[in-house]
Image (spheres, grey):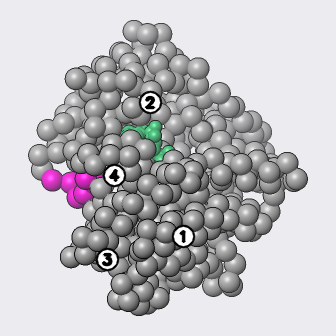
Amino acid sequence: MARIVQKYGGTSVGDVDRIKNVARRIKAIRDAGNELVVVVSARAGVTNELIARAKAVCPEPSEREMDQLLSIGEQETIALTAMALHGCGVEAVSYTGAQAGIFTDKVHTKAKIKTINAAPIERDLKAGKVVIVAGFQGINEEGHITTLGRGGSDLTAIALAAALKAKCEIYTDVDGVYTADPRVVKDAQKLDEISYDEMLELASSGSKVMQSRSVEFAKKYDTNFEVRSSFNQNPGTLVKEEVAYMEKVVVRGVAVDKDQAKVTVSDLRDEPGSAAKVFRALADASIIVDMIVQNVGHDGLADLTFTVPLVDSEKAARTLKPVLQQGGGEVSVTGGIAKLSVVGVGMKTHSGVAATLFEALAANRINIQLITTSEIKISVVIGLDRADEAARIAHGAFELGK
Ligand code: ADP
Ligand code: ASP
Ligand code: MG
């Protein structure tokens, strides 16, 4: 008998038939004698629909009210999944994030999980029930509903698996983690395994198969998890601690992030403390900054360019305006960009990865606007219109297809 946390994503519970399909899968695992906690997402499209409705009534909705609203998507699915299980004779009980004891900090729309009180779930498991938990949501110490950022049901599942010392399985609409998004790169290959660090870099670079914060959490608590399909029984991809032989592969995968914007702060005073002021203000507004480039100063002034998530770009400009009014400088936001990244732990021990990537892009006349590197990743900003093509080019340049 094993204790398993399974997570089913939005497409897997996309309609009534799919919810019934998930219930049948759960019943089979339960009948084999396993203890089961099931995390479900909102039906595919529901979260986006709710966001669109919020924007239709108010262009800049309050983040607290956003969380009140978005949490209902998952609340629908937990109840329907529990009912579907009752329908096939399985004892099951559904819990919202708060009822499941998931306590978060106060940051609405991207809260962090602080603690989990697993006692209620433990009690139900002991009583032989399947426990269905709403993904993507928790409660803060003041009793307000919070959400964990887009794709946050992954985080709910991994955090519950860590708290309950359970095996973790993430069920989605593809067979596992591929060398690139299989919907964009037709010859992308499914990986049997991948290290936490590589998965983290791919996820934070736009591979939306896993939420990046969930991978961060899994690495921190060394919670292995498997990504696999809810539509078949194929083995998936195991995400785990890095082992020596993984370094033999130089590039494990390619990712594209189309949800980024470029922010330029021009004519900033070229003196100690200028950059600090800019990034402190953005940090205090909970805006995640990536790919920072500062050009060589001229006449005592410097330009600073960085990328932020597209959804936060207007907020970034708004946040910086008063800061720059005191210290000098202008802020501008540019959309229409994408970030292309190649990732692999083998980069630590191999040279020439940047040269290969840049040559492949150059041969196809794709212009590079910004570059950053980490020990296991190279990222470039390019035009949005060439993003998918660039992913295929990079995938081919590193011979990741068959
Ligand atoms: P879920 O609703 O189950 O959470 P998501 O839509 O969030 O599913 O993530 C699954 C999708 O991620 C796939 O349909 C695929 O198009 C996309 N994807 C992007 N990059 C990758 C990759 N490297 N491997 C697998 N899927 C990827
Ligand atoms: N429903 C949420 C979203 O669409 C959370 C999730 O699906 O993981 O982002
Ligand atoms: Mg997802």
In percent of width and height, residue 326 lies at 81, 53
Mark in front: 2 vs 1: 1
Q: Residue at x 47, y 88 (%)?
A: 120
Where's residue 108, x and y in %? Answer: 67, 67
The residue singled out by tag 2 in the image is: 183
User: Which residues, given as a range, are shown in magenta?
Assistant: 238-243
Answer above or below: position of 68 versus 196: below
User: Which residue type carries mark 1?
Assistant: Met
Q: Position of residue 125 (x, y in %)?
A: 37, 84
Please name the amino acid that badge 3 sits on: Glu
The residue under label 2 is which amino acid type? Answer: Arg
- Choose the circle earlier in sequence order: 3 or 2: 3
Label placed on residue 227: 4
Residue 327, can we see it? no
Q: Earlier in the sequence, mark 2 or mark 4?
A: 2
Left or right: where does residue 205 sit relative to residue 354? right
Name the residue at 43% across, 10% down.
364
Residue at image position (52%, 83%) is: 101
Q: Quadrant of residue 150?
A: bottom right
Q: Is mark 3 within 8 Å of ligand 1?
A: no
Pointer 4 residue Cβ closer than 8 Å to ligand 1: yes
Q: Secondary structure at mark 2?
A: loop
